[in-house]
Amino acid sequence: MGFREFFSTKKLKACLAKVESHPQSPSAHFELGVEHDRRGCIPEAIECFQKTLNLHPGSAEAHFNLACLYEQRSDGGPAISHILKAGNLFSEREDSANKDKCRKLSREYYKKFKIQPGELSKPEAE
């Protein structure tokens, strides 16, 4: 095991331990999701971000990350739903930079997946 793999494994173990010791912590699940995403484990990352939203439905960051993961899997409906929800939540926080990033991505997703605005039901909190 190389130096990089050692610290990568150490980080994953730390995230797993945090979730185990704080199972109701949205931030623990979010951090584990980020680590799974960084490792390319998309199903595991999605599961962690979904758990984050179960515990904290107002997490714009979890919605944003889910949108990006669903886009990577070419799953347009959930990608668009989550990016729209993220944009709305960032807007509520008056975070214009991230709101604008979501708006730009939503246009890209609509185009990529050949979905017209309004074709989807209202954004899901999945």
Image: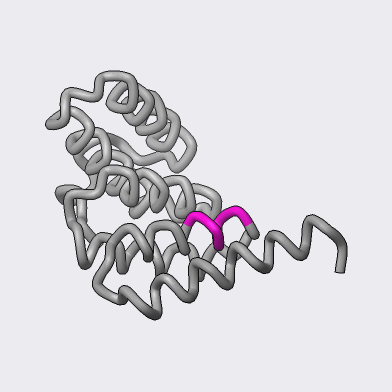
- From the image, give the main secondary structure of the stretch colored magenta: helix
Percent of width and height locating residue 64: 36, 43
- In the rendered image, residue 71 lying in the magenta stretch gets the answer no
Position of the C terminus by quadrant: bottom left
Q: How is the image coloured?
A: one colour
Percent of width and height locating residue 124: 20, 55
Residue for point 32% across, 26% down: 103
Please give left or right for residue 65 compared with residue 57 in the image.
right
Q: Name the one closer to the observer, 41 or 73.
A: 41
Residue for point 87% across, 62% down: 2
State the extent of the magenta-drawn residues as a range. 34-38
Above or below: residue 122 compared with residue 39:
above
Percent of width and height locating residue 117: 25, 35
Please give left or right for residue 39 compared with residue 21 in the image.
right
Which of the 4 image quadrants contains residue 119? top left
Which of the 4 image quadrants contains residue 106? top left
Percent of width and height locating residue 120: 23, 48
State how many labels appear.
Answer: 0
Q: Name the one closer to the observer, 84 or 92.
A: 92
Residue for point 31% across, 74% down: 22
Q: Name the one closer to the observer, 28 or 39.
A: 28
Residue for point 15% across, 48% down: 122
Which of the 4 image quadrants contains residue 54? bottom left
